[in-house]
């Protein structure tokens, strides 16, 4: 907690502020200017940016009688929430709160909402969001493919070797899928042994067929899981936008129908 007067000079500062930014004790004495404080923090890499620009923006808000809130990133990666509330005499009260852990927790929750817990691949919800986004490119004249994939006889792996072995196999399959695709593509796990891929930046439909062959060549190589050698195969269904549709549900349905045709 800090208090500044109308001349942007420090009236009061508690010890927690000094500890939070590892400042020398005399750096935050009464009468110090905000600019001096920020220069100390700049040297200690607990403030990133231009101090004078920051102060100009802050003083403009205070002069208007408005609260100025910002989240400042420290050089060590911490996120600090800074709230400056104007006072009647033209000065202001500032509170600094380390919100790093809160932000990390929020990021973890957001990540978990869109990703599969076992493989850390996007889940069905995030896949659909990305498909909607990528289809905007299709409407501008580009192509994309949706691939639905399903392991063959995966149930027999779970039944004979147990679900823990089946889970490890799914993780290895996910890793091999990552190795077959490019950075712009999206791989998702839809549930069970079902996966899906959005292939972007296609030049022609044959590109999706080439990707499918790469995937199958990779997936059919033997796996070593907890002392067991497992051999599996994969069935793949493909739909192409805009040939087979330009709506997410339509493309996913057509790729799913092609998958069941492939399994048959």
Image: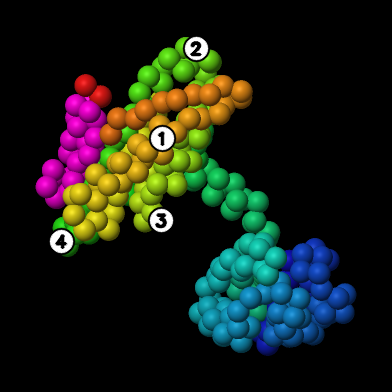
Q: How crowded is mark 3: few (under 14 residues within 10 Å), some or many (20 or more)?
A: few
Q: Mark 1 points at which residue?
A: 219
Nearer to us of marks 1 and 3 is 1
Q: Name the residue under label 3.
A: 183
Q: Name the residue under label 2.
A: 160
Nearer to us of marks 3 and 2 is 2
Indicate which disc, 2 or 1, sits on the residue closer to the N terminus.
Answer: 2
Q: Point out the residue furthest to the top here.
A: 160
Q: Point out the residue furthest to the left here.
A: 243
Indicate which disc, 3 or 2, sits on the residue closer to the N terminus.
Answer: 2
Indicate which disc, 4 or 1, sits on the residue closer to the N terminus.
Answer: 4
Q: Mark 4 points at which residue?
A: 141
Indicate which disc, 4 or 3, sits on the residue closer to the N terminus.
Answer: 4
Indicate which disc, 1 or 3, sits on the residue closer to the N terminus.
Answer: 3
Provide the residue span drawn in magenta. 237-262
Looking at the rendered image, the quarter that the N terminus falls into is bottom right
Q: Point out the residue furthest to the right here.
A: 25
């Amino acid at each position: 907690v800090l208090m500044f007067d109308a001349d942007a000079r420090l009236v009061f500062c508690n010890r927690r502020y000094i500890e939070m930014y590892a400042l020398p004790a005399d750096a935050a004495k009464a009468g110090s200017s905000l600019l001096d404080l920020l220069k100390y923090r700049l040297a200690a890499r607990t403030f990133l940016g231009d101090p004078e620009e920051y102060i100009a923006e802050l003083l403009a808000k205070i002069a208007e009688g408005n609260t100025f809130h910002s989240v400042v990133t420290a050089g060590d990666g911490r996120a600090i929430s800074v709230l400056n509330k104007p006072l009647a005499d033209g000065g202001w009260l500032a509170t600094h709160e380390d919100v790093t852990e809160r932000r990390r927790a929020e990021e973890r929750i957001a990540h978990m909402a869109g990703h599969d817990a076992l493989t850390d691949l996007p889940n069905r919800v995030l896949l659909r969001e990305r498909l909607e986004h990528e289809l905007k490119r299709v409407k501008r004249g580009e192509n994309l493919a949706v691939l639905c994939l399903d392991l063959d006889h995966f149930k027999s792996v779970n039944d004979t070797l147990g679900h823990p072995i089946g889970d490890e196999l799914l993780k290895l399959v996910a890793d091999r899928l990552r190795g077959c695709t490019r950075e712009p593509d999206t791989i998702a796990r839809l549930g069970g042994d079902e996966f899906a891929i959005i292939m972007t930046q296609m030049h022609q439909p044959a590109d999706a067929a080439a990707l499918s062959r790469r995937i199958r060549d990779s997936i059919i190589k033997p796996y070593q899981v907890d002392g067991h050698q497992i051999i599996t195969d994969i069935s793949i269904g493909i739909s192409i936008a805009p040939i087979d549709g330009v709506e997410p549900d339509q493309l996913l349905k057509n790729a799913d129908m092609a998958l069941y045709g492939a399994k048959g």
